[in-house]
Image (cartoon, helix red, strand yellow):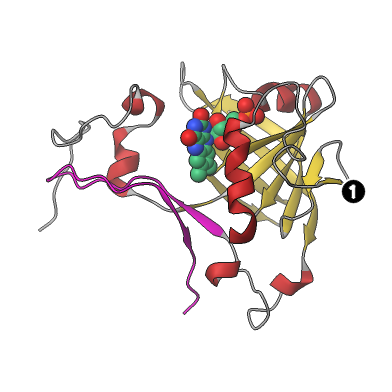
Amino acid sequence: MKYEFENKKPEAFATSWEGQYEVFNWAEFLIGIPMPIFLITTYKENGLPNACLHSWSCFSGDGGGHFCIMSGIPLKYGHTIGNIIRDKEFCINFPNKDIWEKCRKTIENNAYEIDEITENGLTVEKAISINAPRIKECFLNLECALEWIKPLYEGSRYGVICGRTKHIAMDEEYFDENKKGRYGEGGYLINIHSPTNPITGESLSSKIGFVEYK
Ligand SMILES: Cc1cc2nc3c(=O)[nH]c(=O)nc-3n(C[C@H](O)[C@H](O)[C@H](O)COP(=O)(O)O)c2cc1C
């Protein structure tokens, strides 16, 4: 049987942390759509590298170009939005599981005065086509130029940022699924964000997942 959810949080959904359903819409926890994890890297105004773990995104394009669309960038706090508005360039870096803990640490080690890549045990690599740092240990780097920014809706805390891919750097081991490959436990990481049962209210903890190629 299919349940019909009107635009209302299920009663069984308890709040796990203060402000949870202001920061994320309840629907995110009901539908639990998995999304690829990456880090957006930029330079701060003081010239130090900034790293922002992100996930709410899609990637598409046509003959006119390839685009990265990120739909969950806070407009009023965090370093990333200001850096992108100022420099109009950013890099999207895809980690594998071996460096996940270092990537996760960028959430806590996030001060303005630090190089957030080096400080968290990763290495800054110079980009080819933009003025933004790349993360050397990431197997895929998409160097992007800002195409446009708009709020998710009028008054939203989040902005939608569209970047045009200008240059791609990819580790050759990932070209071939018989080598490391893009999928499986060595490839793309997926954000599984506390999927919640709307009947029992049971909420699973957030985890990373992998894509199985079958
Ligand atoms: C899988 C995942 C988990 C995240 N967890 C947190 C978190 O626990 N707390 C938080 O404030 N931001 C979290 N974020 C969001 C941003 O990574 C974080 O706010 C970021 O460090 C902001 O960077 P900035 O200030 O340099 O823009 C998470 C993002 C992803 C993709």
Q: Which residues are magenta?
A: 189-214
Percent position (x, y) of residue 53? Answer: 59, 40
Residue at image location 58% in from the left, 26% down from the top: 150
- Farthest residue, direction left: 1
| Disc 1 element | loop
Q: Residue at x 60, y 40 (%)?
A: 105
Q: Quadrant of residue 12?
A: top left
Q: Quadrant of the N terminus?
A: bottom left
Q: Is residue 99 above or below residue 44?
A: below
Name the residue tied to disc 1.
128
The total number of labels drawn is: 1
* Residue 52 can be seen in this image: yes
Up the image or down, 212 lies above or below 119; here it is below
Q: Is residue 53 magenta?
A: no
The amino acid on which the numbered mark 1 sits, given as a three-letter code, is Ile
Q: Where 213 sits versus 43, above or below?
A: below
- Answer whether residue 199 is magenta in the image: yes
Task: Determine whether, in the image, residue 211 is placed left or right of residue 94.
Answer: left
Residue 104 percent coordinates (x, y): 57, 43
Measured as percent of width and height from the top left, residue 106 is found at 63, 37
Q: Nearer the viewer, residue 174 or 166?
A: 174
Bin the neighbour count of mark 1 within 10 Å (Cα to Cα): few under 14, some 14-19, many 20 and up.
Answer: some
Q: Quadrant of ligand 1?
A: top right
Q: Position of residue 79 (x, y in %)?
A: 66, 24
